[in-house]
Image (tube, rainbow, N blue to C red):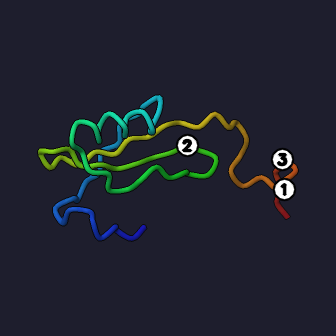
Amino acid sequence: MKKPEEMPVNAALQVYVAVDSVEEILKKAEAAGARVIVPKKEVAGVGYFSVFQDPDGIVLGIFEAGTKTSQPDEDESGTIPENP
């Protein structure tokens, strides 16, 4: 994944915290003065993530687990293709 231009140069290790709602945490973080670096994005079949920087410069990732229980590589009918 290419680093967004807004990402601080010194970001070498990204820590993610599990949350119940990425949207709710981003609202609270922005209200407290945080800057969103990576807006909420979907990780297909897994959940959602976002990255923000707090007013002190600390960069934090947040992750919301999805509710989908199927495999991310299944076809549109919900069937997982058999290996040839």
Place residue 33 in its image quadrant: top left
Place residue 23 in its image quadrant: top left
Does 9 sit left or right of 80 as displayed?
left
Check disc 3 and report the residue beneath it: 78
Give the CA separation, mark 2 to mark 3: 18 Å
Q: Which mark is residue 47?
A: 2
- Seen at 45% across and 46% down, the residue is 49
Give the position of the C terminus as an image quadrant: bottom right
- Seen at 55% across and 51% down, the residue is 43
Residue kind at label 2, given as amino acid type: Gly
For this orientation, the residue located farthest to the left is 56
- Residue mark closest to the camera, 3 vs 1: 3
- Seen at 49% across and 37% down, the residue is 64
Residue 47 drawn at (x, y percent): 55, 43
Give the CA separation, mark 3 to mark 1: 9 Å
For this orientation, the residue located farthest to the top is 20
Q: Sort mark 3 into few (<14), some (14-19) or many (20+) by Cα contacts within 10 Å.
A: few
Element under disc 1 = loop
Mark before the other along the chain sequence, 2 or 1:
2
Residue kind at label 1, given as amino acid type: Pro
Mark before the other along the chain sequence, 2 or 3:
2
Q: Which mark is residue 81?
A: 1
In-front residue for pair 10/33: 33
Residue kind at label 3, given as amino acid type: Gly
